[in-house]
C-alpha cells in the first residue's frame, strides 16, 4: 500500500477502534523504558518515534472518539495484530514522503521537506529539554511564571517525578498500593497501566524526594499539559499538520488517571510552551526575542568554556580593520594555540509553513537561521586569515591580543533549538565558502559535544574531521555525526562516495543517563569506547599541555590520525623502554592506507639534558630527510614529556584554514 490517503484512512479506523490506547501503550513502552535483561538495565528502543506517537493520538482526537472504548481491554492476540499493523502502516506512510530524485534539483519537493523535518524530530533527549529551560529562558522566568500562572521550573520536578515513578513501576519497584496483577507483562494490555499516573501519586513522590511543591501545583501542571476534549486544529490530516497533542501530550482518562505515551513529547511541550507564550504577546515579544538571543550567546559561551576554558572564550568580540572600519561581531570566539572558533548564534525556529513543505518558506527560514550567520562568520574568518593590523575588542572595551599567528579558523553556527531537517536543507540551500566549512548545530548538540569532547584539541579535531568529510555523510541529526566521530573519528568508506550514519547516538546517550540514574555516577560511555586506546589519548593530552614553539594543534591532529594498531604499538614500545637506563629511542614510519605520511620518534631515558638534546637532533635529522612529510620527535624522562620537535610538511588534507 503506497497511497497516502488510504494509509491514513486505515490508521484512522485503528486509532478509533476498541483498545487503541492499550495497543499504543504496548508500542510506546518499548521506546520509553529501559529493559531488564539478565539482571542488567539496557535501553532498547523500538523503531517508532515520539513524533509518530503524537501523530497517532492526534488522529484519534481529530474526529469524535470514545475514551471508554479506546481503553477497553482486548484479546492479547488482537492487540499484537493491531500493533503490527500500525507499525506496517507507519512505515508505509513514511515511504510515501520519500523522494527518489534523478538529480539534486528534484529533491526540492513538498514531500521531501516534510519528510526530512518530521522524521528528524529527535534532536534532544528529555533531560536536555528540561535542563535548558533555565538556560534559554534565564532572563524571562519571572515574566513567564506570571503568564502561565505557576512556576515553570516546578515543571522540571514534576516531570522528573513522573519519569522516575513510571520507571520504578516498570522495574517492579512497586508501591504497595498497586496490585501486582495489573503489571503482569505477559498480559499485553497492562502496558497501559504503566503509562498511567495520578496527580496524587506524583505529588506524594515529589514530597518524598524533598521537592517543595503543593498539590495545586501538580494539578495545574496536569491541567496545562493534558488533552481532555480540546478541539484539534481544523486542517489536521498528514504528518505535517499542526497537532494539538504536541502542546497537550497527556491524555486525561479520568480525575485520577492520566495517560502519558511519550515522556519526550511531554518534555518538548514543557520546553516549548514559554516560547510560544512569549512570541504571541504583542507587547513583550520583541523584548522576549532579544532576551532569548542574549541567553543563547551566554549559554554558548558557558558550554564552550567547558572545553576551552574561561581565559580562552570570549563573547561579543568586535572585529575592526587597521583603519578602524567595523568588519563584524563574533558572538562567541574561542582561541586555542594557533586555532580559533567563531561561533555565531541565531534564535530562529522552523515556521509552521516550512514544516508544511513550502519550499520558499523553508529556504527563507534556513537562510535566516543558518546561512546568514554562517556568512557573517566567514567574513570574520577571512579577516582573521588576512589579519594585518586587525583589531579585536571585547564588550568591556579591552583589546583582545592573540599571541600566535592563527593557522586554523572554524566557523560554528548555533541555533536556539534543534532545527529539524537542517541536514537536508543544508544540502539544498546552503552556499558554502571555499575555505571555511559550515558547522551547524543546535545548543543541545553543543552541550553534548562539550560533554564528550572536553579536551579543546579533541573538539577542534572533530571540526577538522567534519571539514575533511564534508559531503561524505548523510544523517538526520548533527548529534549522529558526533557519535560517529567518537567511535570512528568520522572515517568514511573510501571506496564509496557517501556514508549513511544511523540514528543510534541517542540510544548510547540515553544509556549514559540511565546508568547515572541507577548508580549516581557519570558513566560517560564514550570516554572509554573511543577508537584510540585511552592510554594513547592520555599521552596526546599530556603533549598538549607542554610549552613548545610548535603548533600543538598540528601535533594533536597528527597523533589523532593514527590507527588503533599503531597507537597500541607505540604504547608497547614506551612500556618496554622503561627498563633502559641511558637513552632508548625508536622511530616508526606512518602509512595512511597505502600512502606514506611521515613518522614518529620517541626518545626516553633518565638524563633530562641528554634526552632533550637527542630529541632535537633526531627530530631535525628526520625533518631534513623527509621535508614534505610530518615528523614528530618526543622526549620522555621518567614518564614525563620534556619536549617535542615537530615538522609539519604538507599532506592532501592540509589547508591553512578549514
Image (tube, rainbow, N blue to C red):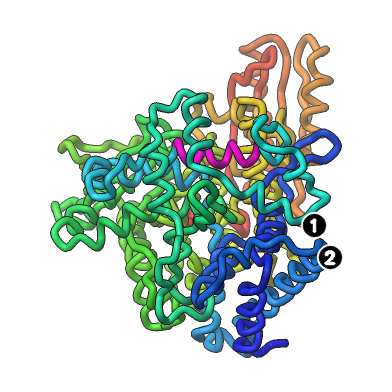
Q: Position of residue 187 (x, y in %)?
A: 80, 52
- Which portion, as a residue range, is magenta? 157-168
Residue at point 72% right, 60% down? Answer: 73
Q: Position of residue 219 (x, y in %)?
A: 40, 43
Dot 1 alpha-carbon crowd within 10 angstroms: few under 14, some 14 to 19, many 20 or more: few
Residue 423 lies left or right of residue 48; in this view the side is left
Residue at point 39% right, 31% down? Answer: 213
Work out which quarter of the rendered image holds the N terminus and state it: bottom right
The picture quadrant where one finds residue 643 is top right
Q: Position of residue 256 (x, y in %)?
A: 52, 46
Residue at point 81% right, 26% down? Answer: 573
| Element marked by disc 2 | helix
Q: Main secondary structure of the magenta part?
A: helix
* In the rendered image, the vertical position of residue 351 relative to residue 254, given as above or below: below
Q: Which residue has dot 1 on it?
A: 594
| Element marked by disc 1 | loop
Q: Position of residue 260 (x, y in %)?
A: 56, 53
The picture quadrant where one finds residue 648 is top right
- Sequence-wise, the earlier of marks 1 and 2 is 2
Give the camera-side residue of 57 and 263: 57
Q: Nearer the viewer, mark 1 or mark 2?
A: 2
* In the rendered image, the vertical position of residue 351 relative to residue 319, given as above or below: below
Per the rendering, the mark at residue 342 is none
Dot 2 alpha-carbon crowd within 10 angstroms: few under 14, some 14 to 19, many 20 or more: few
Residue 28 lies left or right of residue 276; in this view the side is right
* In the rendered image, the vertical position of residue 532 relative to residue 100, given as above or below: above
User: Does residue 436 appear in the picture of this structure?
Assistant: no
* In the rendered image, the vertical position of residue 9 relative to residue 388, given as above or below: below
The picture quadrant where one finds residue 532 is top right
Q: Is residue 162 magenta?
A: yes
Q: Is residue 418 magenta?
A: no
Q: Which residue has dot 2 on it?
A: 77
Amino acid at each position: 500500500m503506497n497511497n497516502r490517503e488510504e494509509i491514513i484512512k486505515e490508521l484512522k479506523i485503528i486509532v478509533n477502534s476498541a483498545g487503541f490506547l492499550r495497543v499504543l501503550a504496548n508500542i510506546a513502552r518499548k521506546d520509553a523504558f529501559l529493559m531488564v535483561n539478565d539482571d542488567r538495565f539496557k535501553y532498547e528502543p523500538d523503531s517508532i518515534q515520539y513524533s509518530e506517537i503524537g501523530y497517532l493520538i492526534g488522529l484519534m482526537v481529530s474526529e469524535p472518539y470514545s475514551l471508554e472504548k479506546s481503553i477497553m481491554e482486548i484479546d492479547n492476540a488482537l492487540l499484537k495484530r493491531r500493533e503490527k499493523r500500525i507499525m506496517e502502516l507507519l512505515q508505509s506512510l513514511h515511504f510515501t514522503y520519500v523522494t527518489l530524485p534523478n538529480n539534486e534539483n528534484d529533491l526540492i519537493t513538498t514531500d521531501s521537506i516534510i519528510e526530512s523535518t518530521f522524521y528528524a524530530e529527535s534532536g534532544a533527549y528529555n533531560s536536555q529539554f528540561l535542563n535548558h529551560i533555565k538556560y534559554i529562558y534565564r532572563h524571562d522566568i519571572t515574566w513567564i511564571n506570571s503568564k502561565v500562572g505557576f512556576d515553570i521550573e516546578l515543571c522540571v520536578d514534576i516531570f522528573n517525578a513522573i519519569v522516575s515513578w513510571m520507571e520504578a513501576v516498570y522495574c517492579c519497584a512497586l508501591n504497595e498500593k498497586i496490585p501486582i496483577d495489573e503489571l503482569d507483562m505477559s498480559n499485553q494490555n497492562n502496558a497501559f497501566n504503566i503509562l498511567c499516573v495520578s496527580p496524587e501519586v506524583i505529588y506524594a513522590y515529589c514530597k518524598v524526594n524533598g521537592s517543595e511543591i503543593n498539590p495545586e501545583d501538580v494539578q495545574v501542571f496536569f491541567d496545562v499539559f493534558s488533552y481532555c476534549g480540546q478541539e484539534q486544529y481544523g486542517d489536521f490530516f498528514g504528518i505535517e499538520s499542526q497537532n494539538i497533542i504536541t502542546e497537550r501530550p497527556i491524555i486525561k482518562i479520568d480525575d485520577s488517571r492520566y495517560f502519558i505515551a511519550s515522556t519526550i513529547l511531554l518534555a518538548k511541550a514543557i520546553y516549548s510552551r514559554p516560547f510560544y507564550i512569549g512570541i504571541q504577546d504583542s507587547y513583550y515579544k520583541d523584548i522576549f526575542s532579544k532576551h532569548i538571543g542574549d541567553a543563547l550567546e551566554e549559554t554558548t559561551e558557558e558550554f564552550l568554556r567547558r572545553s576551552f576554558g574561561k581565559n580562552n572564550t570570549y563573547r561579543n568580540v568586535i572585529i575592526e580593520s587597521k583603519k578602524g572600519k567595523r568588519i563584524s561581531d563574533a558572538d562567541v570566539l574561542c582561541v586555542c594555540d594557533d586555532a580559533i572558533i567563531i561561533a555565531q548564534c541565531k534564535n530562529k525556529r522552523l515556521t509552521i509553513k516550512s514544516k508544511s513543505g513550502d519550499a520558499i518558506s523553508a529556504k527563507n527560514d534556513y537562510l535566516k537561521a543558518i546561512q546568514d550567520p554562517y556568512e557573517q562568520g566567514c567574513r570574520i574568518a577571512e579577516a582573521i586569515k588576512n589579519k594585518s593590523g586587525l583589531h579585536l575588542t571585547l564588550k568591556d572595551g579591552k583589546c583582545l591580543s592573540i599571541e600566535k599567528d592563527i593557522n586554523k579558523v572554524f566557523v560554528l553556527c548555533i541555533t536556539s533549538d534543534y532545527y529539524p531537517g537542517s541536514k537536508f536543507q543544508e544540502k539544498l540551500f546552503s552556499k558554502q565558502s571555499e575555505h571555511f566549512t559550515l558547522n551547524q548545530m543546535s545548543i543541545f548538540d553543543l552541550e553534548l559535544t562539550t560533554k564528550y569532547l572536553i579536551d579543546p584539541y579533541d573538539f577542534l579535531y572533530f571540526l577538522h574531521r567534519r571539514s575533511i568529510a564534508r559531503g561524505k555523510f548523510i544523517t538526520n541529526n548533527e548529534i549522529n555525526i558526533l557519535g560517529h566521530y567518537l567511535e570512528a573519528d568520522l572515517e568514511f568508506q573510501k571506496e564509496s562516495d557517501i556514508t549513511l550514519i544511523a540514528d543510534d547516538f541517542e540510544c548510547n546517550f540515553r544509556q549514559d543517563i540511565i546508568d547515572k540514574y541507577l548508580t549516581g555516577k557519570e558513566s560517560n560511555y564514550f570516554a572509554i569506547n573511543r577508537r584510540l586506546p585511552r592510554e594513547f589519548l592520555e599521552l596526546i593530552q599530556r603533549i598538549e599541555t607542554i610549552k613548545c614553539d610548535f603548533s600543538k594543534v598540528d601535533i594533536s591532529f597528527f597523533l589523532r590520525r593514527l590507527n588503533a594498531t599503531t597507537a597500541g604499538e607505540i604504547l608497547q614500545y614506551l612500556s618496554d623502554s622503561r627498563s633502559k637506563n641511558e637513552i632508548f629511542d625508536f622511530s616508526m614510519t606512518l602509512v595512511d592506507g597505502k600512502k606514506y605520511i611521515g613518522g614518529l620518534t620517541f626518545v626516553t631515558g633518565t638524563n633530562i639534558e641528554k634526552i632533550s638534546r637527542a630529541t632535537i637532533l633526531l627530530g631535525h635529522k628526520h625533518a631534513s630527510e623527509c621535508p614534505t612529510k610530518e615528523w614528530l620527535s618526543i622526549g620522555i624522562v621518567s614518564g614525563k614529556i620534556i619536549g617535542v620537535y615537530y615538522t609539519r610538511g604538507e599532506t592532501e588534507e592540509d589547508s591553512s584554514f578549514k
